Image: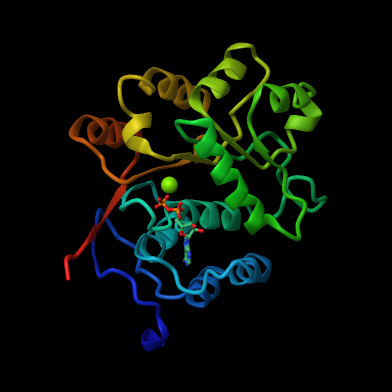
Amino acid sequence: EAEDAPQRPRQRIVAKGSNVPAHADSFTELAERYQMSSLLLSNLDRYGYIYPTGIQSYGIPILLESRDLAAISPTGTGKTLSYLLPVMASLGAPSSSSNSDAGAGVRAIVVAPTRELAHQIHNECLKLAEGRKWRIVLFSKASAATLAEKATRDKVDIIITTPLRLVASLRSGSLELDNVRHLILDEADRMLDSEFFPQVEEILAACTHPSIQKAVFSATLPAGAEKMAMQMLQDPIRVVVGLKDT
Ligand code: ADP
Ligand code: MG
């Protein structure tokens, strides 16, 4: 199997923390180990995601085992799927489906520093969601307005947003985060620097569900941001992917 794997730059991967889950070398192994839905798997396949990248093979099991994670991996190594896949697998069924115990408010939030980035993450999420009635919202002034009714926004599964946009809705009381089970900060070096950290703190304070999972993803994590990450994460696993020179 390994022989068929694509030629990727050689990576050095270090995972540190308590009881680090075993990494998985293929998406089928992940699906078997964690009973991931065949729909998610076929969506991966359809978009040409055949082999997990390094951060995916380490990060996905960690998130599927409900652990907090600080993931540091270079640009272009597939960090987005590293959190979207396990979050969607953990959510199970969309909140709109009748057999779901959800529907009590948005269950997953992805925060990214720019609208452009949030937009890209949203597109990636829609690919994975194909074939099921997930409600995945790219947060904006307009979409915030469509969520004015509580009954509507209670059925949202995932919100992808910039920190400013989210905080504006929290302050106006037009969104609750008390049912959020997964909070992801992408480009965490920026999310945890002095520009955004006050807003991140407001978001954290609004996420009151006792079993929330938190994860940060970044290409780099400078000392200050790392310190903030370790404060917000609980018993985290820290995965660092470095490219090896060949
Ligand atoms: P990062 O956030 O680490 O910079 P992205 O998540 O934006 O990386 O992914 C970079 C590119 O790699 C995207 O075009 C994405 O679709 C693609 N990609 C991600 N995971 C895989 C995979 N397992 N196999 C093939 N392509 C992938
Ligand atoms: Mg990225």
Classify 106 as above or below 83: above
The quadrant where residue 57 appears: bottom left
Describe residue 209's horizontal placement relative to residue 9 as left or right. Answer: right
Q: Where is residue 199 shown, x and y percent of the image?
A: 44, 20
| Whether residue 241 can be seen here | yes
Classify 189 as above or below 38: above
| Whether residue 109 can be seen here | no
- The residue sitting at the top extreme is 172
Give the residue drawn at x 44%, y 60%: 60
Quarter that holds the N terminus? bottom left
Give the residue drawn at x 46%, y 19%: 202
Give the residue drawn at x 76%, y 61%: 131
Classify 218 as above or below 205: below
- The residue sitting at the right extreme is 98
Describe residue 78's horizontal placement relative to residue 89 as left or right. Answer: left
Quarter that holds the C terminus? bottom left
Q: Where is residue 211 shown, x and y percent of the image?
A: 50, 41
Instruction: Compare residues 7 and 231 and report the one nearer the observer.
Output: 7
Q: Where is residue 100 shown, x and y percent of the image?
A: 75, 50
Specify the color scheme: rainbow
Describe residue 223's horizontal placement relative to residue 126 as left or right. Answer: left
Instruction: Compare residues 153 and 137 and report the one nearer the observer.
Output: 137
The quadrant where residue 150 appears: top right
The tally of labels here is 0
Give the residue drawn at x 59%, y 18%: 170
Q: Where is residue 210 shown, x and y percent of the image?
A: 50, 35
